[in-house]
Amino acid sequence: MHNAAYSWAKPALVSKPQLIAYSQNVAELLGISAVELTSDEFAEIFTGNKILAGMQHFAMCYGGHQFGHWAGQLGDGRAINLGEVVTNNHGLKTVQLKGAGRTPYSRSADGLSVLRSSIREFLCSEAMFHLGVPTTRALSLCLTGEQVNRDMFYDGHPKLELGAVVCRVSSSFLRFGSFQLPAARKDVSLLKQLVDYSISTDFPSLLSDNAGVFNSKLYLSWFAEVSERTCSLIVHWLRIGFVHGVMNTDNMSIIGETIDYGPYGWIDNFDIHWTPNTTDAQGKRYCFGAQAEIGQWNLFQLANAIFPLINDAEALNALLNEYADNYQQQWLLMMTKKLGFTQYQGDKDQQLFTDLEGLLSAVETDMTVFYRQLAKLEIKKERLQEQDWLPILDPCIYDLEELTDTFKVQWSLWFSRYIVRCQLDDNSAEARIVLMNSTNPKFVLRNYLAQQAIEAAEQGDYGEIAILQKILQCPYDEQSEYQEYAQKRPEWARNKAGCSALSCSS
């Protein structure tokens, strides 16, 4: 589709729309009442069966680099926007149905989604919001009554699965690829319209700072802000152990939100090389530890796209270099908080951080559990004995037999250094615990937890979805009644389909 940023597209009619989960928080944001939420009409609207007055259904046109290679035109192949809602306190919000049928950008696909991937997107969108991570939101999850044919593992064994639609909400669904496509086609007029629209709609303060003038200075400021938000987002991902899994440029939000929850995952044992995406299993391009580097690579592609509006390679390169420095500073600040320190104190702190990650990698250790356990360490002792720190590690180590005498000595030395560092800090033991427990979540949406909810829902039991919703609304709280949801991954889930890695199949 040339010379166009979007195309009109209508959702497909479905046979039996049924609401099975919703976010009260997002409903309130959009001004939807409790009565409206539970009405039959709601399910009709948010599967696409009923069109309300004022709705304008459209799908967006964009391109992108996929796994490092230019893929040309892509676009919303199974996402259809219903329109924009003017909220009371949060500006314009675009409301979008994912899995609502074919669009002009579906190519040979059917534009539909299945229940398993829709549950994962619904739960993760809201989990990320409550973790304090910028993200698209999810209003509702509905069954369609349809059967959808999918080959989950791309191994020649497709099967029929339950169809579903998720309603996604964001201030903007523009992606890096939205700007790459017109640039690749040398359509500078459309490129400028899109950048000007993005600035006016989602970065209005930049326009005010530039006296309302659209020029190269403003475009550089916009790119700097996009870079800053991208960097901040990825540091958040690393803080909580999240791996996006498919950081193609068409999956990168221009406003710095987590978008497109496909083969994502949380690292259980700390492994910087882990990827949840089976398609990426060999190359590991989008593994946990590569996400910051890929963020910069994607920004480089965006810089190339907007170059015709700026014509200053030196200025753009300077901003790309600033990204690396900014990332290092933000990562150090993030790690400072994870360990409960009030401020970063230089190279010795950095060495403490990197040595810790080396130990977490050397013996299979659960990252999420470890940082919550670390907050429990007694820091007032002059000298630590093994009985002081071993109970901190016990719940985190996947195989205690791997904790050899050599590793025990290394851990003992690290804990001793950590204690000394804590005692140098101008912070009480209580304040340290509060800081750590507000930085390190107790509950995250581990793949095996999501898979259990999926398997129950496929049998018509949506109770586990509701339980996970409740727990994940307060991920930093103790919630001792849900302790079983905060434990390290069970052994049965290590290699189970849906619990260890996933494909891009929807």
Image (spheres, helix red, strand yellow):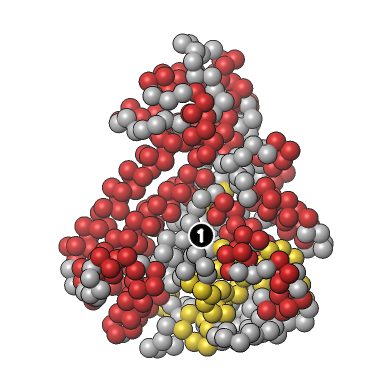
Looking at the image, which residue sits at the far front? 88
Residue 474 in view in this figure? yes
Q: Position of residue 470 (x, y in %)?
A: 69, 50
Compared with 272, 427 (above or below) is above
Q: For the residue marked with disc 1, what is the amino acid?
A: Thr
Estimate the x, y position of residue 307 in percent, counting from the top left.
24, 72
Q: Residue shown at 58%/30% (left/top)?
A: 373
Q: How far from the left and from the top, in percent, is residue 256?
A: 42, 61
What residue is at 25 percent from the left and 65 percent from the top? 209
What is the total number of numbered labels drawn onto the structure image?
1
Please state which of residues 433 and 489 is positioned toward the viewer in this rendering.
433
Q: Residue at x 64, y 30 (%)?
A: 395
Q: What residue appears at the point 58 percent right and 41 percent down from the top-left corner? A: 476
Residue 483 visible, this angle: no
Measured from the top left, where is residue 87 in percent x and y?
Answer: 52, 70
- Name the residue beneath numbered marker 1: 135
Residue 162, relative to residue 321: is it above or below? below
Quadrant into which the C terminus falls: bottom right
Quarter-of-image position of residue 306: bottom left
Vertical placement of residue 449 versus 187, above or below? above
Depicted 352 relative to depicted 174: above or below: above
Q: Where, quadrant-wise, is the N terminus in this rendering?
A: bottom left
Element under label 1? Answer: loop
Disc 1 crowd rating (10 Å Cα; few below 14, some 14-19, many 20+) is: many
In the displayed structure image, the side of residue 487 where residue 438 appears, left or right: left
Along the viewing direction, whichever of 326 and 112 lies nearer the viewer? 326
| Left or right: 197 as drawn, with respect to 210 | right
- Between 87 and 255, the one lying in front of the other is 87
